[in-house]
Amino acid sequence: DIQMTQSPSSLSASVGDRVTITCRPSQVISNHLAWYQQKPGKLPKLLIHDASTLQSGVPSRFSGSGSGTEFTLTISSLQPEDVATYYCQRYDDAPLTFGGGTKVEIK
Amino acid sequence: EVQLLDSGGGLAQPGGSLRLSCAASGFTFSSYDMSWVRQAPGKGLEWVSGISASGGSTYYADSVKGRFTISRDNSKSTLFLQMNSLRAEDTAVYYCAKAYRKSCFDYWGQGTLVTVSS
């Protein structure tokens, strides 16, 4: 099965900072890669699908890029409401797999 | 408005069984693939099982293959997960999720807690 490795596992940044989270599949995958945000005690929220397409209603400070074996989620200007854990997920075929998560905190 | 209502969780003994349900509304249930995703306490997300819109194809994580069975009743807009031979490591909140763009997930149920303990 394809494993999804996220890095870092946690980060602390200041409001306004640019934040980048990386997701590395264990082998080349298609662009069927999604990013989710999960705030404490809340349901996961789809942010980006097809590696770089912003889901409707998601702020434009979030962006996704990458291909093959390296994908990134970028928050261009970190806001207090972005405190959450972020997960990548590949969905090209079963079994679907999530990354281990990246916890984002405000410094 | 899309709604997914998970139910059926609870306490089960190791080796026991539970059946989870997910009642869907607000969309044409029979047109969408569906999945179950779980989250152990304090841990990350783990995809468990998926089913095609017609119910004709099913998929499982290796960790549950042979023990769990996913099914759906499109006439009642309901998704199921039959969980047998439960283990302590199956303890988690189980979410049903509606597929979007093949198999990412745009809507999630509120989750139902399954605890496996003697």
Image: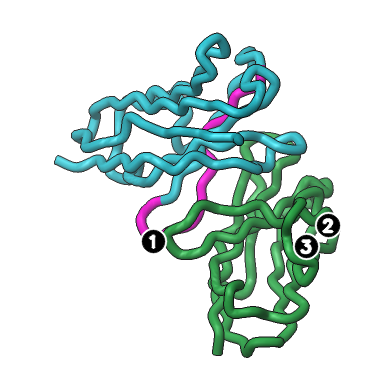
Q: Position of residue A95 (x, y in %)?
A: 62, 37
Q: CA distance from mark 2 to mark 1?
A: 28 Å
In the image, what residue occupies the spot 32% across and 45% down?
B91
Residue at the front extreme? B1
Circle 2 packing at 10 Å, graded few (<14), some (14-19), many (20+), is many
Q: CA distance from mark 3 to mark 1?
A: 25 Å
Q: Which chain is green?
A: A
Q: Chain of mark 3?
A: A
Instruction: Name the image quarter holding the N terminus of chain B.
Output: top right
On screen, A32 above or below A10?
above
Element class at badge 3: strand
Relative horizontal placement of residue A72, taking residue B88 as reference (left or right): right
Instruction: Name the image quarter holding the C terminus of chain B.
Output: top left
Q: Position of residue A9 (x, y in %)?
A: 56, 72
Q: Are marks 2 and 1 in contact (CB under 8 Å)?
A: no
What type is the residue that disc 3 sits on?
Answer: Phe
What type is the residue that disc 2 sits on?
Answer: Ser
Q: Which residue position is annotated with label 2?
A: A52
Q: Which residues are magenta?
A: B40-53
Element class at badge 2: loop
Q: CA distance from mark 3 to mark 2?
A: 9 Å
Relative horizontal placement of residue A37, taking residue A92 as reference (left or right): left
Q: Are marks 3 and 2 in contact (CB under 8 Å)?
A: no
What type is the residue that disc 1 sits on?
Answer: Gly
